[in-house]
Image (cartoon, rainbow, N blue to C red):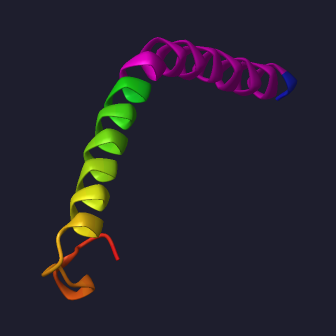
Amino acid sequence: MITLLFAGFGALVVIAVIVGVVDAARAADRRFIASERRLAWERRQQRRRTTPTATAWGDEDD
């Protein structure tokens, strides 16, 4: 019974390590995508502020 408990705990530790390594490997990709989306959002907001006919009803981000 104790052996099964330790085996389960060991499996959880191994899974946590694997998830941490995969997450760390993909973090740079996610940051790059997030920065591109942020720049696109900022461009849309700037365009919305400078366009006199734009209304808040047509903006999907509000």
Q: Quadrant of the N terminus?
A: top right
Which x, y percent locates residue 41?
30, 52
Residue 5 magenta-drawn? yes
From the viewer's perspective, tell me whether residue 10 is left or right of residue 28.
Answer: right
Rendered-image quadrant of the C terminus: bottom left
Q: How many numbered dots are placed on residues in this image?
A: 0
Is 52 placed above or below 18 here?
Answer: below
Taking the spot 70% from the left edge, 27% from the top edge, the residue there is 8
- Residue 13 position (above or below residue 46): above
The x, y position of residue 11, in whole percent, is 64, 20
Q: Give the magenta range.
A: 3-29
Residue 36 image offset from top left, x and y in percent: 30, 34
Residue found 70% across the figure and 20% down from its top: 13
Q: Is residue 48 left or right of residue 16?
A: left
Q: Tell me which secondary structure the magenta stretch mostly adopts.
A: helix
Quick check: 30 above or below 58?
Answer: above
Quarter of the view holding residue 5: top right
Residue 55, x across and y down, in percent: 21, 84
Query: Which image quarter: residue 29?
Result: top left
47 in the magenta segment? no
Of residues 20 and 49, the one drawn nearer to the viewer in this rendering: 49
Q: Nearer the viewer, residue 49 or 22?
A: 49
Which residue is more in the foreground, 10 or 46?
46
Q: Residue at x 44, y 17 (%)?
A: 28
Nearer the observer, 58 or 55: 55
> Residue pushed farthest right?
2
